[in-house]
Image (spheres, helix red, strand yellow):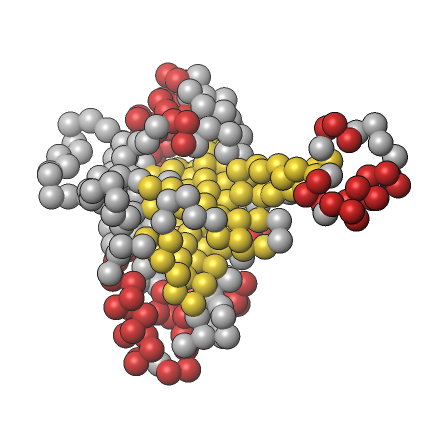
Amino acid sequence: MKQLTISGYSTALFSTWYFIEEAGVLFDAGDGVTAALLQKSRKVNHIFISHADRDHLTGLLQLNQLNARDGLPVICYPRDSKSFPALAEFISRFDAYANGSVWMPVSPGDEIRIHKDMLVIPLRNEHVRTEKHITRSLGYQLIETKRKLKPELAGLSNAEIARISLEHGKESTTTEVRTTILSYSGDTPVADPSTWDGSRTLIHEATFLGGEEDIPVHAHKNLHSRLEEVMEMVSGITIEQLILGHFSSRYDAAEIDRAILSLCDKYGIQIPVFRVLPGETVKDILRSSPVNK
């Protein structure tokens, strides 16, 4: 697949959303998403919400009102979050003409086929503290699937392969190959690095830069990542590019960029590192200039 067109806005506490244009996928739906996308919001066929914090879902009402039609969009949300059935019920009463959308509870490991050659897999994260069998917060991976000829059949002619496929089905001649073209962390503390290893693009939250100025995370609060933890984790895995977002609005652009550059140097990070600064909507993030160019 060619380079993805990713647009987004992500400021901790206020709003987060990322639109993957080629896939017709929206990860989270914070306030202002429809106003930012305008007509492109019609391209959103699947919405994957990470959790029920208001800054990740308050844009759903307008997006749904403008774009709901029979069977679309499909709104996927953490299975055990009761906020979403309540929101769906409210929308059905608030605007009877916006009832075509599908609300789908999802769990870690589910496979949601969004195109013939593309699916999304939810991943549990630890932003919301729950028992292991309860799902209230998720990250997601966008997977490209292709069928390739089984290696043991490589020496056969096209006619022989066609005959085998006709007699036994295409599963007998090909095998599915999966590529993680994008991973989205959602709000989360830093996870096991292997979770993201092999992703072409990783979108990861970095709410705090780290240091004494950070507000302590109390036991009753949801959990977030610190930039240095993210960069240290990224230094030990193989990805092609990194997008950082969900920075606290307490930081200005210069502070964030200095911290990213310092940590790229500290951990020897050579891949392009992009960022979505507080209060800024970025269109086509991967074609902007990386911080560490």
Q: Position of residue 272 (x, y in %)?
A: 50, 30
Regarding residue 38, the answer to whether it shows in the image is no
Q: Residue at image x 50%, y 45%?
A: 142
Location of residue 210 by image quarter: top left
Left or right: residue 130 compared with residue 107: left
Choose between 201 and 36: the one closer to the eye: 201
Furthest residue in direction left, as rendered: 219
Q: Residue at image x 30%, y 80%?
A: 94
Q: Position of residue 250 (x, y in %)?
A: 23, 42
Choose between 217 and 172: the one closer to the eye: 172
Left or right: residue 187 compared with residue 114: left
Q: Residue at image x 58%, y 43%?
A: 144
Q: In the rendered view, would you say 271 is above or below 221? A: above
Regarding residue 124, the answer to whether it shows in the image is yes
Furthest residue in direction front, as rendered: 167
Q: Position of residue 44 (x, y in %)?
A: 50, 61
Q: In the rendered view, would you say 202 is above or below 31? A: above
- Quadrant of the snapshot with the N terminus: top right
Q: Residue at image x 86%, y 38%?
A: 160
Q: Position of residue 170 (x, y in %)?
A: 72, 45
Choose between 67 and 178: the one closer to the eye: 178
Location of residue 157 by image quarter: top right
Choose between 186 and 132: the one closer to the eye: 132
| Numbered marks: total | 0
Furthest residue in direction bottom, as rendered: 96
